[in-house]
C-alpha cells in the first residue's frame, strides 16, 4: 500500500483522483485550504504542509488557480517534499502550455519547469480541457441574447473522470517524466460545441463567431492546445451533457 497526498483533493479533478486511489487500496491524504486534518494554503505554505507530506510516498499535485499563485505554491510543495524525502511528484498540466501565451498556461508551464528541476522523481501528464470548463464558459456567455465564441477556434474536451483514472494509474508507479499527452475523443469547433450545449439545455440563442486578436488566440486558432494524435479519451461532450442535464430544460 502506498501513502499518497492529493493536493486540491476536494476539487473537480482531485476528489476523483482521491476516490480512485482509495478504491485501489492506497492510503490517501487530501490537502486543500479547508479539508481537515490537512488544511493548508499552498501559496502561503507553513508548518501544516510539512505535516501533510511527512511519510508520504507520492504527491499528486492537482491544486491550481487561474487567479495566480501556482508557482509560489509549487515552490512550497517542492521544498516540503524534499524535506520529507518524497519519492514521486505527479503533476497535471495542460496541452499547449509551452505554445499558447495565456497567463494561466505560462504559470502551468513554469510549474512544470520547477518540478523538472526539483531533484525529485517526477511525472507530468498534460491533458486537454475538461468538459465542465466549456460548460462554465457557455453558461456565462449564455446569459446574453447572442452566444459569442472566438472565431476559428476548436477544442478537444475530455472527461475529467478519465483523467483521474490515468493519474491514479501513474501515482503508485515509478517516476515517468513527461508521459504521453491525453486528449478528448473529438476535435470540435467552438460553434459546434456551443450548439450542442444549447440543445442539451433547451436554450435558444444564435451563436456568433467573434474574431479575437492577439498572440494567444492566434495560437489557439492554429491548434496549439490540441492533441489529435492522442485522442485517447472516450467520453464525448454530448455524453457529458446528457449526464449533467438529462433531457434538457425548456427553451429560454
Image (cartoon, rainbow, N blue to C red):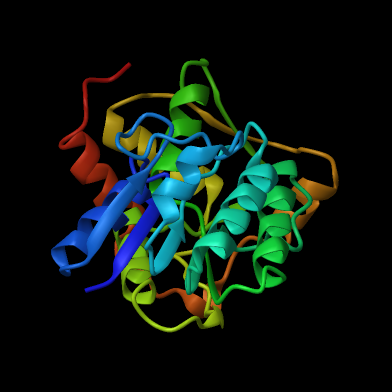
Residue 104 at x, y = what percent?
A: 68, 44
> Can see residue 210?
yes
Counting every numbered tag in the picture gives 0
Instruction: Reply above or below: 128 against 229.
Output: above
Which image quarter: residue 113?
Answer: bottom right
Instruction: Reply above or below: 65 against 170.
Output: above
Task: Tell me what residue is drawn at x 35 percent, y 52 percent.
Answer: 237
Which image quarter: residue 212?
Answer: top right
Task: Tell me what residue is drawn at x 29 percent, y 30 percent.
Answer: 201
Return the residue nearer the eye: 206 or 44. Answer: 44
Residue 208 at x, y = what percent?
A: 60, 32
Residue 179 at x, y = what percent?
A: 53, 79
Task: Tell me what residue is drawn at x 30 percent, y 51 percent.
Answer: 29
Instruction: Reply above or below: 8 against 208.
Output: below
Return the residue nearer the eye: 183 or 89. Answer: 89
Instruction: Reply above or below: 77 against 162.
Output: above
Task: Tell me what residue is drawn at x 51 percent, y 39 percent.
Answer: 47
> Can see residue 194?
no
Residue 131 at x, y = what percent?
A: 40, 48
Q: Specify whether 198 is left or right of 142.
A: left
Return the residue nearer the eye: 90 or 51. Answer: 51
Q: Which part of the image, by quadrant, shows the C terminus?
A: top left
Q: Which part of the image, by quadrant, shows the N terminus?
A: bottom left
Return the residue nearer the eye: 87 or 108. Answer: 87
Amino acid at each position: 500500500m502506498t501513502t499518497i497526498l492529493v493536493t486540491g483533493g476536494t476539487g473537480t479533478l482531485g476528489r476523483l483522483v482521491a476516490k480512485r486511489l482509495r478504491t485501489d487500496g492506497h492510503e490517501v491524504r487530501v490537502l486543500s485550504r479547508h479539508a481537515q486534518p490537512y488544511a493548508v494554503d499552498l501559496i502561503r505554505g507553513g508548518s501544516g504542509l510539512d505535516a501533510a507530506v511527512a511519510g508520504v510516498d507520492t504527491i499528486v499535485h492537482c491544486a491550481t488557480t487561474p487567479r495566480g499563485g501556482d508557482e509560489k505554491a509549487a515552490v512550497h510543495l517542492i521544498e516540503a517534499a524534499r524535506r520529507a524525502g518524497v519519492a514521486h511528484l505527479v503533476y497535471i498540466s495542460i496541452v499547449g502550455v509551452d505554445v499558447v501565451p495565456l497567463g494561466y498556461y505560462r504559470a502551468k508551464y513554469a510549474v512544470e519547469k520547477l518540478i523538472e528541476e526539483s531533484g525529485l522523481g517526477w511525472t507530468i501528464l498534460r491533458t486537454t480541457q475538461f468538459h465542465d470548463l466549456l460548460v462554465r464558459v457557455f453558461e456565462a456567455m449564455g446569459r446574453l441574447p447572442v452566444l459569442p465564441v472566438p472565431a476559428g477556434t476548436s477544442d478537444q474536451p475530455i472527461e475529467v473522470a478519465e483523467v483521474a483514472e490515468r493519474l491514479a494509474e501513474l501515482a503508485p508507479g515509478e517516476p515517468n517524466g513527461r508521459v504521453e499527452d491525453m486528449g478528448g475523443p473529438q476535435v470540435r469547433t467552438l460553434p459546434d460545441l456551443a450548439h450542442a450545449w444549447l440543445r442539451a439545455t433547451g436554450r435558444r440563442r444564435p451563436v456568433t463567431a467573434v474574431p479575437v486578436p492577439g498572440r494567444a488566440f492566434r495560437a489557439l486558432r492554429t491548434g496549439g492546445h490540441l492533441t489529435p494524435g492522442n485522442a485517447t479519451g472516450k467520453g464525448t461532450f454530448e455524453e457529458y451533457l446528457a449526464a449533467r442535464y438529462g433531457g434538457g430544460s425548456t427553451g429560454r
